[in-house]
Image (cartoon, rainbow, N blue to C red):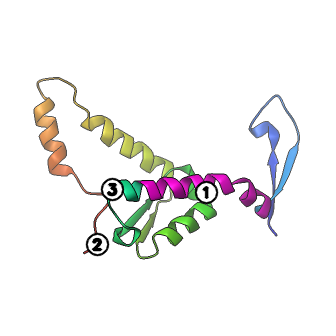
Amino acid sequence: MVNASLDVDDFDPNQEGNIEISQEGFQKMCELLLKRVKNTLNAALHNSNFNANQINKVLHVGGGSRMPMIKQLLRNMFPEAEHCIEEHPDEVVAIGAAYYAYSLPSHSKSDRRRQAEIHNDERPLLKRRK
């Protein structure tokens, strides 16, 4: 069994000490989180009228995607998909947020030109399998 030690003052400089936790204990503490992630993914599939087998690429982004249990959940839910795992998943979120912010209307004269640029550069993140 894998054990880890967390230094409390890394999270709260006013406190000292270590917390010992096993991998099994951490997984047990995260069960509710995993259920919520799975429910959110199932709702997104349902709302988009996609089936899991129609997803051909899954982007692992954000800090949670570093967790082995999240990676395994995604592989189990989308076994046929290519799983794209970036070395810096937080940067991918920031880039996506920047693209989204750029796409918001600004009510300026250049807005139409900018919207045209965005539509010419769009790349679908989810594609249906045929």
Of callouts 3 and 1, the N-terminal one = 1
**What residue span does the magenta drawing correspond to?**
24-43
Identify the mark at residue 34; answer none if there is no mark: 1
Identify the mark at residue 14; answer none if there is no mark: none
> Is 26 within the magenta?
yes
| Residue 58 placement (x, y as % from top left) | 41, 64
Q: Which element is circle 1 on?
A: helix
Q: Looking at the magenta stretch, what is its main secondary structure?
A: helix
Q: Which element is circle 2 on?
A: loop
| Residue 10 placement (x, y as % from top left) | 75, 39
| Residue 8 placement (x, y as % from top left) | 81, 40
Q: Pointer 3: what residue?
A: 48
Residue at coordinates 24% horizontally, 75% vertically from top-left?
130
Residues at marks 2 and 3, CA–CA distance in whole angstroms: 14 Å
Vertical comparison of 112 with 124: above or below: above
User: Is 103 displayed left or right of 52 in the figure?
Assistant: left
How dense is the environment of label 2, judged by Cα within 10 Å: few (below 14), some, or many (20 and up)?
A: few
Identify the mark at residue 129; answer none if there is no mark: 2
Residue at coordinates 36% horizontally, 53% vertically from top-left?
47
Residues at marks 1 and 2, CA–CA distance in whole angstroms: 26 Å
| Residue 41 placement (x, y as % from top left) | 47, 57
- The amino acid pointed to by label 1 is Leu
> Is 73 within the magenta?
no
Vertical comparison of 9 with 21: above or below: above
Q: Which element is circle 3 on?
A: helix
User: Is 125 displayed left or right of 90 in the figure?
Assistant: left
